Each structure stands twice: as structure tokens, then as C-alpha cells.
Image (cartoon, grey):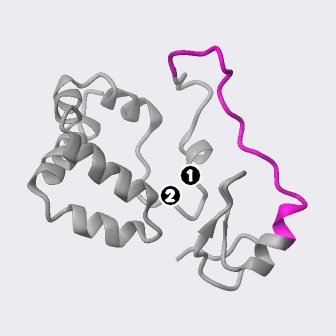
Amino acid sequence: MQLCKVCSEQTPKYKCPTCKIRYCSLSCYKLHKDSCLPVEKPPPNSTKRTVSTDTWSNEDFLDEDDITDAVPVEKLCLLGHSKELKDLLCNPHLRELLRTIDSANSKEQAMNAAMQEPLFVEFSNQCLKIVEQEDA
């Protein structure tokens, strides 16, 4: 279970729009905002995002409390090369489901709801098939 990164007492309900840490209340946000540093963004002229597995790790993407079943970054990179996933992502309904999950306050509830959709289950299974390959 996650705790507020400011007070370390309550379950966080919010995420700082600048640095993405999780906090539980307005008072914690007010304490945090004075020391908040923005997350680095890619340069504005970069048109293609590339991930070098030499410079990134799961810890760069997730807080330590978020890592339970971490997938190595090099395996995650395989997702971007999958024709099957690209074909599935052409479906606007799937893209909307993914946006809904991404913006949900309760990711767990959003995932449970999405798993009732056969299209999302197909997408999830394809992702798992790719990252669980032994030869990757």
C-alpha cells in the first residue's frame, strides 16, 4: 500500500501535476509545492521517443512503492515493435479504454472494469505474451 510522500501517514489520493509524487491532502500539497521540481521532458525538437536501455530502469518510471512485478525495460521496449499490438491499438475503443485507465484516480478499479472488455483482455494477453517470452 502506498503512503503520502509528504506526510507518510495517509493513502495518497492525488498526484502532483509537476513532479508526479503522490500526496493525500491540500495541506500536504502546500508543504510539497515549495520544494517541487518538474519532471524532465524530452527536448521540443525530438520527434521520435527512443529509450536506451543502458540509461533507463524501472525505477526511472515508477516509485519504489509501485514496483511489484517489474518488467525489465528491454522487454517493455519489445511492445513498441509488435505488429499485433499496433493493430489492436488502431481500435479507437481500446485507445479510449487505455486513456480512461491512465486518467483514473483508482487504477485498480479502472483495470478491473477494463478487464470485463474482451478487446482489453486481448490487448493485455498480447502484452503479456511479448514480455514473457524467454528468448527476449
**From the viewer's perspective, is residue 128 above or below residue 103?**
above
Compared with residue 25, is residue 58 higher up or lower down, i.e. above or below?
above
Quadrant housing residue 54: top right
Q: Above or below — where is 77 with respect to 58?
A: above
**Secondary structure state at the residue bearing disc 1:** loop
Q: Which amino acid type is marked by label 2?
A: Ile
Q: CA distance from mark 2 to mark 1?
A: 7 Å
* Residue 51 position within the rendered picture, expressed as x and y whole percent measured from the top left: 52, 24
Q: Is residue 53 magenta?
A: no
Could you tell me which residue is drawn at 60 percent across and 16 percent down? 46
Q: Residue furthest right?
A: 34
Q: Which residue is mark 2?
A: 67
Residue that label 1 marks = 62
x then y, percent, for residue 103? 45, 58
61 vs 105, nearest the viewer: 105
**Amino acid type of the residue that numbered disc 1 sits on in the rendered structure:** Leu
Query: Could one spot residue 88 in this view of the protein?
Result: yes
Label 2 SS:
loop
**Residue at 29 percent of width and 38 percent of height:** 131
- Residue bounds of the magenta highlight: 31-50
Regarding residue 128, the answer to whether it shows in the image is: no
Q: Nearer the viewer, mark 2 or mark 1?
A: 1
Dominant secondary structure of the residues highlighted in magenta in the image: loop
Q: On the picture, is 81 further left or further right than 27? A: left
Q: Where is residue 30, by image quadrant?
A: bottom right
Say if the magenta span includes residue 40: yes
